Image (spheres, rainbow, N blue to C red):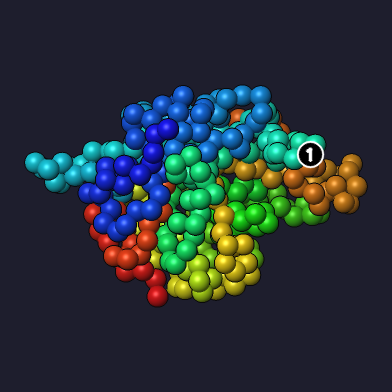
């Protein structure tokens, strides 16, 4: 099995702090690798009737990844070249995940496709490395103009998920789910929103489809706090929050979880269903069958031993 660990050396010119997980897909990573959950991704969270590559597409050189982590040319450092390929992640009406269980129960309320960080073929063991001390989770997101989202729905697009199903933090788009349904689309449905474990809003910014939106979320796992960095395109990351409490998260190993990125679309309330069913977004509600997608790059996790990678070879101080 191909290991993600050598990728840290590949990106050494673009980042200066210790990389403990690298999810930036090199150009030799293939669709077959994706279908077989070869590092650095576990690709099983998808519709059960299709391969992973039906939903997740490696874009090669078709679209440049976020330029933050490009490698400068040694003979002309003012120029740089991409060293990763973006991944388009889509959902359609077959995107019904069936998790393990007895009996297995399809999640009919959701439409979801996600990639989960893993190393050495093990996503759970990776958590014991990335979810201790103070670490920074990077991701860059871009719209897919040919497959737009339906902003009347809520989309969860980046998060860390402990075993209890909560999210240590999450990045959202769309109209937050309400029961009964509120005004749609919500006033800030076209904003990217970073929320903490208790769903408090930490940062929001308009989502422009043609730009790369670069995020880094600093997590102090011991003191249970968060901090957010953000930029667009080739602008270096900058802190956009201070240290924010996140003390509703479970302490210790119970608060550790898998790093997800992808498209999870929540339903709308179905008036014909019972109140209990209407509140159960996993298994009930209204979904439409359109194909929708987002594009990702720049996914990695680093320690803050030498600061926080801001892009273009720049390192800045952690939020304190």
Closest to the observer: 120 or 35?
120
Which of the image's four quarters has the C terminus?
bottom left
Q: Position of residue 140 (x, y in %)?
A: 42, 47
Residue found at x 85% / y 47%: 277
- Any part of residue 313 in sight: yes
Quarter of the view holding residue 104 = top right
Number of marks in the rendered image: 1
Position above or below: 85 against 274? above
Please tell me which residue is depicted at 58% across the width and 62% down the height of the picture. 253
Residue in view at x 34 percent, y 35 percent? 26
Pick whichever, 210 or 301, lies toward us.
Answer: 301
Residue at 77 percent across and 52 percent down: it is 181
Which residue is under mark 1? 102
28 up-or-down from 316: above or below = above
Q: In this view, does 114 lie to the left or right of 243?
A: right
Report crowding for label 1: few under 14, some 14 to 19, many 20 or more residues within 10 A (C-alpha): few
On the question of residue 290 being in view, the answer is no
Q: In this view, does 281 lie to the left or right of 8?
A: right
Task: Find residue 269 and report its horizontal and vertical position in percent.
Answer: 79, 46
């Amino acid at each position: 099995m191909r290991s993600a660990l050598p990728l840290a050396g590949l990106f050494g010119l673009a980042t200066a702090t210790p990389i403990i997980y690298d999810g930036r897909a090199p150009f030799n990573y293939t669709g077959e690798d994706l279908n077989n959950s070869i590092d650095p991704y576990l690709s099983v969270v998808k519709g059960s009737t299709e391969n992973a590559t039906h939903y997740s597409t490696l874009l090669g050189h078709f679209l440049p990844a976020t330029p933050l982590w490009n490698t400068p040319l040694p003979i002309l450092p003012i120029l740089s070249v991409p060293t990763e390929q973006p991944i388009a992640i889509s959902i359609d009406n077959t995107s019904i995940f069936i998790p393990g269980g007895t009996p297995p129960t399809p999640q009919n309320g959701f439409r979801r496709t996600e990639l989960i960080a893993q190393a050495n073929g093990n996503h759970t063991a990776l958590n014991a490395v990335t979810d201790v001390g103070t670490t920074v989770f990077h991701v860059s997101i871009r719209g897919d103009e040919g497959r737009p989202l339906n902003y009347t729905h809520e989309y969860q697009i980046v998060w860390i998920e402990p075993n209890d199903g909560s999210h240590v933090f999450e990045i959202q788009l769309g109209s937050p789910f309400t029961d009964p349904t509120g005004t749609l689309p919500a006033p800030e449905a076209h904003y990217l929103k970073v929320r903490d474990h208790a769903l408090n809003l930490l940062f929001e910014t308009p989502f422009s489809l043609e730009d790369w939106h670069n995020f880094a979320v600093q997590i102090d796992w011991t003191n249970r706090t968060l901090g957010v960095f953000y930029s667009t395109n080739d602008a270096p990351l900058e802190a956009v929050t201070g240290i924010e409490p996140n003390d509703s998260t479970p302490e210790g190993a119970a608060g550790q979880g898998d790093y997800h990125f992808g498209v999870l679309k929540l339903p709308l309330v179905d008036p014909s269903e019972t109140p209990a069913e209407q509140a159960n977004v996993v298994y009930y509600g209204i979904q439409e069958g359109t194909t929708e997608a987002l594009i990702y790059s720049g996914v990695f996790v680093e320690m803050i031993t030498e600061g926080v990678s801001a892009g273009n070879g720049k390192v800045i101080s952690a939020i304190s």
